[in-house]
Image (cartoon, rainbow, N blue to C red):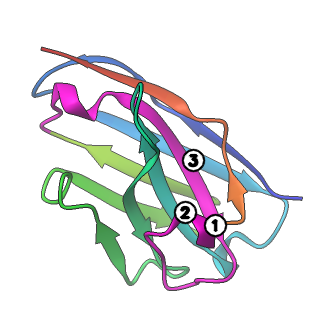
């Protein structure tokens, strides 16, 4: 069983920054890709970013490219999502997820096997 716990969410003004973290346990963390997804009120959950098992490859949604940076530390079993220049439209519950099938990373929710409970990010205008 793999457990993932997100942290770092909160309330921030537009233009500000937040750093989300996801801590994983239960299996060899370095054996799977990690991703972040988000779900805004009344909307479907959407892809934000993904990183390959060794951190060599990252993909970002167009809406966050250039503002968000995803990194991982396999020694600490964590991934971090640095979010800068936040906008009100970034307001959502953010979820981290792990994929053992797509070790190079994936933007598809169906490729992920493990999910955290989510952390709320609210950006005020």
**Residue identified by numbered label 3:** 22
**Helix, strand or loop at disc 2?**
helix
Above/below status of 114 relative to 4: below
Q: Which stretch is magenta?
A: 85-111
**Residue identified by numbered label 1:** 112
Within-10-Å neighbours for mark 2: few <14, some 14–19, many 20+? some
Q: Nearer the viewer, residue 35 or 41?
A: 41
**Helix, strand or loop at disc 1?**
loop
Q: Position of residue 3 (x, y in %)?
A: 78, 50
Q: Is residue 7 visible?
A: yes
Name the quadrant containing residue 98.
bottom right
Q: Judge depth for marks 1 and 3 and give the one in front.
A: 1
Whole-angstrom CA distance, mark 2 to mark 3, is 17 Å
Circle 2/circle 1 CB separation < 8 Å: yes
Residue at 69 percent of width and 69 percent of height: 29
In the shown orientation, is residue 63 left or right of residue 60? left
Whole-angstrom CA distance, mark 2 to mark 1, is 6 Å
Whole-angstrom CA distance, mark 1 to mark 3, is 15 Å
């Amino acid at each position: 069983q793999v457990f993932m716990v997100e942290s770092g969410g909160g309330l921030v003004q537009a233009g500000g920054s937040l750093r989300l973290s996801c801590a994983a346990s239960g299996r060899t963390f370095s054996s799977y890709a990690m991703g972040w997804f988000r779900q805004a009120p009344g909307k479907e959950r959407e892809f934000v970013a993904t990183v390959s098992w060794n951190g060599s490859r990252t993909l970002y949604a167009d809406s966050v490219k250039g503002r968000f940076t995803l990194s991982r530390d396999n020694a600490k079993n964590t991934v971090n999502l640095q979010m800068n220049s936040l906008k009100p439209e970034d307001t959502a519950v953010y979820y981290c997820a792990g994929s053992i099938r797509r070790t190079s990373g994936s933007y598809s929710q169906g490729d992920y096997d493990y999910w955290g409970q989510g952390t709320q990010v609210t950006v005020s205008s």
